[in-house]
Amino acid sequence: MPVRPQIQDLQAEVIAWRRHLHQYPELGYKEEQTADFIQQKLSQWGIEHQAGIAQTGIVATIPGQEPGPVLAIRADMDALPIQEENEVPYRSRHDGVMHACGHDGHTAIALGTAYYLAQHRADFAGTVKLIFQPAEESPGGAKPMIEAGVLRNPTVDAMVGLHLWNNLPLGTVGLREGPLMAAVDLFECSIQGKGGHGAMPHQTIDAVVVSAQIVNALQSIVARGLDPLDAAVLTVGQLHTGSASNVIADRAWMSGTVRYFNPDLAMETAGLPSVIAAQMDQIITGVCQSWGATAQLKYWHLYPAVINDPRVTDMVRSIATSLVETPLGLVPNCQTMGGEDMSFFLQEVPGCYFFLGSANPSQGLDFPHHHPQFNFDESALALGIEIFVRCAETFNLEVVGR
């Protein structure tokens, strides 16, 4: 891959930064050691920055030699509540916490980009803002950072970000204009029946049977309740009920997630937060009425869909095409039902979020995201820096039609 020599020379140090971050993972809004490490590097390089935004977030500002537009680059910093199972020298030293989604790599790429741009200000016009964001996994740090004003002073004209992606092999880039990642909604449902003896079901309203019918019936929403061109997923992830083998449960509780791309599905319907929530409520109420049970549904939006701007995506696509072997290296129309709070940034400014292939099966570096053995091929780090640097060198207001 044609990564410039100066970035290739930086690769070993970027890997060291990533491995340091991997050893000291922190959950959302607790990224204090991570933030300290980032600040130390930025101060060492003479890069102006502001810390403590939305608790642990950081924004670094790097002006080029000439005035011009403002491009933001976003990297998330938080880890997951997972016990690491990798046997590597840099495995997590924080029990029960692990960088199992690549955010340590995202932060290292952003740091490498900051270092390079600070040394080569004459090569780009305008300003680059690097946004180090907390709490992407949960409960979401993007919106609080926006509310804190990270897209102002100076005002951001466009934004880019990447996700290391073990669903794609090393040396590939996946992107598309329009919806890239799904909206994320969550729900909880409590069901009240009437308990009793397992040998006397006629005296009861069995919460187990009612909840089982609800779980099955909810799948009809995606199968029959939505336009088949509107991709969606409804998953019941938890179902808790019952206390003994000879006792009919009087109550059940379930929770899950709903994913979709079409923003119209998030519109309030029948007094409920979305089209799908309204259909869920109708099904749950109907099943419960048929059995004499009652239920209460709670439904809320977590993240909107990640929707890429066509013009900024064209810029990133052009850069990626010049770097990876085509046609195999560029994966068009790449999509996932996974969610990301980068979506809040892209609701405010035009931008492009893309996937950077990081899997290497020959080295066992292909476990899926959020797996206790997740790891990635660190060769991807230099390519990520090269793409971000070229975005800074390429971006102008014509990209966003101004």
Image (spheres, rainbow, N blue to C red):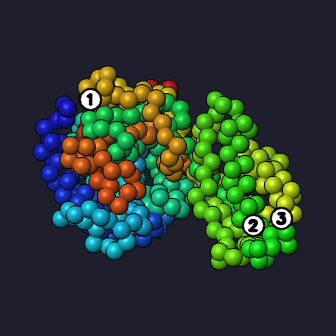
Q: Report how far apart the C-alphas of labels 2 and 1 lie in the structure.
A: 55 Å
Q: What is the x, y in percent for residue 18?
A: 25, 57
Q: Secondary structure at mark 2?
A: helix
x 44%, y 33%: residue: 334
Whether tag 3 and tag 2 are in contact, CB under 8 A, the answer is yes
Residue sitting nearer the eye, 326 or 34: 326
**Residue 285 placement: quadrant:** bottom right
Q: Residue furthest front?
A: 199
Residue type at mark 3 is Ala
Residue 207 is marked as: 2
Q: Residues within 10 Å of mark 1 (few under 14, many from 20)?
A: some
Query: Which is in the foreground here, disc 1 or disc 3?
Result: 3
Q: Report how far apart the C-alphas of labels 1 and 3 lie in the structure.
A: 58 Å
Q: Is residue 254 left or right of residue 134?
A: right
Whichever of callouts 3 and 2 sits on the residue coming sooner in the sequence is 2
Query: Which is in the foreground here, disc 2 or disc 1?
Result: 2
Residue 58 visible? The answer is: no
Whether tag 2 and tag 1 are in contact, CB under 8 A, the answer is no
Residue sitting nearer the eye, 253 or 76: 253
- 381 relative to 245, above or below: above
Q: What is the x, y in percent for residue 126?
A: 36, 39
x 81%, y 73%: residue: 200
- 69 relative to 62, above or below: above
Whichever of callouts 1 and 3 sits on the residue coming sooner in the sequence is 3
Residue sitting nearer the eye, 14 or 116: 14
Q: Which residue is mark 1?
A: 324
Q: Residues within 10 Å of mark 3 (few under 14, many from 20)?
A: many
Residue type at mark 1 is Val
Q: Which residue is mark 3?
A: 293
